[in-house]
Image (cartoon, helix red, strand yellow):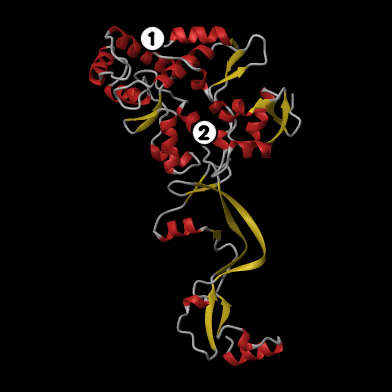
């Protein structure tokens, strides 16, 4: 190992003034059998540093055919390798000047051993969780009545192994898709089965002359139980799905589900005829409105007559570029009001749909209305 005198002699040869440097000089040496493959370096922001310092975990998730992501308890980060022209050294025993408060004015030589080195590191970038796969897995075995034989089911631990998202993001999405936990497994009701249940409930509300905002839960549960169509735990889940509280049915959700039932069997529907049939199909006292169908149905007001068709946001690609390409293949030009429900989930933190459209689409004005079309030719 070098001595202090050898270090000072090296500075003189390099024509570096000793007074321009910190008084402490580190002499680094490689440990035995050090290799660049021994360690992986990762760059963390302040939030993730505090997360680690608090003793919490960061988990890398992804199947073999997926690009890996890093997840904290509530956020998801994209993992990319960043190369650097400078050799990065892993020196645990080395301290920065602010970590050496008792530095004397006289020169000091300290020794530290290099544990590893690398020409690259993992760079993290906040990204949207990849949740499309979650509903796909649950829809492999939707609940449509008492189980017969063995069926594929998923616990929360199973979902955490398969889905590239944090636990909080997965839990929030399970609520969004109306999933329920039954006997430790997460399930989604089959849509036709769900509509069958909704029909039983609305018929009961009508026959008893109840208000949709004041439905006696216990009476409904007893009635559904007598029909032997679902157990009590699933009954309570159903009411929670369709109500802000368990004693009320959510008008918007009931109308939206009824619209989906009508639209799923037609390629296109005459808009005025659809609105008439839709209003007749929802329970009496409820109002069917087109704003209830954001992200579910697409209106074409340029056609004669005007039409409406089913276009669910969950059926569109998760990737931003693929999403825009898919939308522009369906329709050449969009108004912001029409396209907004289908891109709102793509917006990052503090990003607006307007900014997203500016980045991924071209705008023009037609008949006094601002419209957006693709920045690239769309394959036909």
Q: Quadrant of the N terminus?
A: bottom right
Location of residue 226 (image quadrant): top left
Q: Nearer the viewer, residue 221 or 110?
A: 221
Q: Residue at x 63, y 40 (%)?
A: 355
Q: Describe residue 266's horizontal placement relative to residue 167 as left or right.
A: right
Q: Residue 295 placed where, x, y %?
A: 54, 25
Mark 2 → mark 1, Cα distance in angstroms:
37 Å
Q: Residues within 10 Å of mark 1 (few under 14, many from 20)?
A: few
Q: Nearer the viewer, residue 213 or 325?
A: 213
Q: Residue at x 46, y 80 (%)?
A: 101
Indicate which disc residue 133 carries. Answer: 2
Residue wearing tag 1: 284
Q: Describe residue 321's horizontal placement relative to residue 201 as left or right.
A: right
Query: Does 285 sit above or below residue 29?
Result: above
Q: Residue 250 placed where, x, y %?
A: 38, 22
Q: What element does badge 2 sit on?
A: helix
Q: Residues within 10 Å of mark 2 (few under 14, many from 20)?
A: some
Query: Does 104 sit above or below residue 89?
Result: below
């Amino acid at each position: 190992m070098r001595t202090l005198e050898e270090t000072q002699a090296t500075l003189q040869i390099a024509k570096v003034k000793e007074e321009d440097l910190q008084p402490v000089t580190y002499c680094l040496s490689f440990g035995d059998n050090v290799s660049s493959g021994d360690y992986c370096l990762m760059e963390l922001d302040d939030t993730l540093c505090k997360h680690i310092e608090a003793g919490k975990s960061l988990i890398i998730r992804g199947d073999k055919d997926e690009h890996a992501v890093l997840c904290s308890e509530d956020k998801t980060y994209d993992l990319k390798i960043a190369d650097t022209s400078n050799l990065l050294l892993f020196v645990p025993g080395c301290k920065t000047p602010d970590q050496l408060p008792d530095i004397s004015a006289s020169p000091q030589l300290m020794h530290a051993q290099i544990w590893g080195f690398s020409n690259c590191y993992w760079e993290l970038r906040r990204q949207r969780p990849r949740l499309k796969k979650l509903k796909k897995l649950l829809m492999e075995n939707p609940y449509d009545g008492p189980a017969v034989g063995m069926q594929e089911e998923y616990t929360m631990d199973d979902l955490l192994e398969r889905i590239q998202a944090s636990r909080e993001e997965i839990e929030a999405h399970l609520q969004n898709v109306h999933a329920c936990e039954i006997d430790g497994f997460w399930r989604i009701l089959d849509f036709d089965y769900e509509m069958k249940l909704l029909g039983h409930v609305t018929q009961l509300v009508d026959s008893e002359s109840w208000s949709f905002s004041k439905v006696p839960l216990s009476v409904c549960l007893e009635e559904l139980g007598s029909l032997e169509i679902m157990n009590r735990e699933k009954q309570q889940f159903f009411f929670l799905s369709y109500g802000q509280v368990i004693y009320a049915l959510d008008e918007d959700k009931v109308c939206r589900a009824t619209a989906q039932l009508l639209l799923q069997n037609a390629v296109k529907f005459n808009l005025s005829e659809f609105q008439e049939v839709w209003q007749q199909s929802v329970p009496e006292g409820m109002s069917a409105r087109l704003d209830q169908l954001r992200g579910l149905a697409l209106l074409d007001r340029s056609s004669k007559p005007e039409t409406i068709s089913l276009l669910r946001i969950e059926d569109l690609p998760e990737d931003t570029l693929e999403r825009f390409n898919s939308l522009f293949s369906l329709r050449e030009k969009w108004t912001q009001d029409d396209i907004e429900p289908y891109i709102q989930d793509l917006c990052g933190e503090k990003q607006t749909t307007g900014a997203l459209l500016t980045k991924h689409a071209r705008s023009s004005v037609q008949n006094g209305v601002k419209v957006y079309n693709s920045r690239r030719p769309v394959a036909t």
